[in-house]
Image (spheres, rainbow, N blue to C red):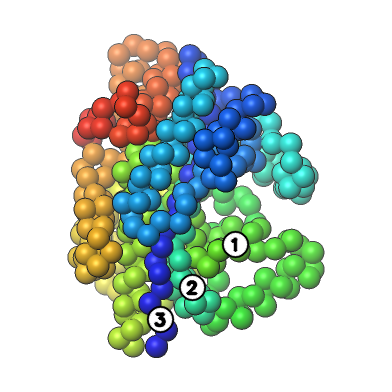
Amino acid sequence: MIREPSFTVGIEEEYLLVEQDTGRLISEAPDTLLKEVEVIIEGQVAPEFFQSQIEVGTRVCHTVQEARKELIRLRRAVAGVANEYGLAIIAASTHPNASYVTQRHTNRDRYEILAQNMQVVARRMVISGMHVHVAIEDDDLRIDLMNQTTYVLPHLLALSTSSPFWEGTDTGLMSYRIAVWNELPRTGLPESFDSYAEYQRHVDILVEAEVIEDSTKIWWDIRPSARFPTLEMRVSDICTRLEDAVCIAALYLCWLRMLWRLRRSNQRWRSYANMLIYENRWRAQRYGIDGTLVDFGRGRMVPYPQLVEELLALLTEDAKHLDCLAEVNHARTILRRGTSAHWQRQAYNDAIAAGASEGEAIKGVVDMLIKETLAGVSSQVAVDAMPPAR
């Protein structure tokens, strides 16, 4: 029997930098901004492809509560330094009206190569996400759990949606980020592999053919991390509300522990073809928590809230074991008051109804995102501040 994994957690978040007075996404970052952030959170911050983005990563966390404290510290640090430059951070997967043509990528060799290879596809990547790492030390177990976890990825995406706008237009999607991300190669759902060795053989073919330098250039919705003995979930939008991010990380952690528990009893989650899971991925991208997903076992559409209740019941034992029941059950709060995508649409539509111009309405959306990104993080923002219920 394979020893129980440590199930430690790490979370990466990518923020967008905006001007406080105008709400505009910056195109060029101040030279010293990143250096000042690094002084505060050394080793936990990095530039992203565009200068308007900044990425942070928690330390290895042994509990979900520890991860929450880390995210608070990281958001507070980046926001504090940004404020000194008249900037703010927003945790949203797209900016409501930024144009990708005005963006400048970070001056680093790897980004120069990416821009040259991908051309306009790379230039459109003005999107941010959240990645959750869970330690699964055994290589083959990591692959086995990856194969079974694809089923739940659409469920996690739906709870995280924060990208309904693109270049000033309401796209009609809850996660337009996914549509942009899909333009890159080696994205989407992973292949199914029988072992870690089989996975590595496929990676080696691409490396030997000089298609990629290493497996960090494989950008699936879930993948074995190239740097850590973790299974990295990458499908979700970044959550504007920190508590929502913690909820999704807890759900993912408990799902993996549930799968391990099944394996311990010589059971496993039923595998479904990617063609089926892609249908639910699309429905999550389009409708988020408002729609239905296909229940493959029953062969019919099921309202998303019903599926969440079934998921919570399935994971209760694991949430209790990992001491994150409250964080997992927060999914019900998300269902009740909506995701960031709902708040953004509501802020925009309310402003237009009140007589605001389109530009003023967009500025109102950004102002809301700035506030909600720091809800429960900054002492200047009330912890219980909450967007109106849907």
As measured in the structure, the alpha-carbon distance from the residue carrying label 3 to the one carrying label 2 is 9 Å
Q: Is residue 203 visible?
A: yes
Verify CB contact (< 8 Å) between mark 2 and mark 1.
no
Q: Nearer the viewer, residue 105 or 172?
A: 105
Distance, label 3 to label 1, CA atoms, is: 21 Å
- Measured as percent of width and height from the top left, residue 300 is found at 28, 66
Residue at image coords 30%, 34%: 376
Task: Specify few, some or many for label 1: CA neighbours under 10 Å numbering under 14, 14-19, or 20 or more.
Answer: few
Say whether disc 3 or disc 1 marks the residue closer to the N-terminus. 3
Give residue 343's quadrant in the image.
Answer: top left
Q: Tell me if 247 is positioned left or right of 238 in this view.
A: left
Q: Position of residue 47 (x, y in %)?
A: 62, 39
Q: Secondary structure at mark 1?
A: loop
Amino acid type, residue under disc 2 in the picture: Glu
* Number of numbered discs: 3
Q: CA distance from mark 2 to mark 1?
A: 12 Å
Q: Please determine whether, in this image, residue 236 is positioned above or below residue 372.
A: below
Residue under the image location 35 percent in, 47 percent down: 68
CB atoms of marks 3 and 2 within 8 Å? yes
Image height check: is 209 above or below 48? below
Lateral position of residue 145 relative to residue 326, left or right: right
Which quadrant does the C terminus fall into? top left
Residue placed most toward the observer, 17 or 361 = 17
On the image, the x and y values in percent for residue 335 come to 24, 46
The residue type indicated by label 3 comes to Arg
Q: What is the number of the mark on residue 137? A: 2
Give the residue pinned by disc 1.
Answer: 227
Please name the amino acid that badge 1 sits on: Arg
Mark sitting on residue 3 = 3
At which x and y percent is residue 159? 34, 49
Q: Quadrant of the N terminus?
A: bottom left
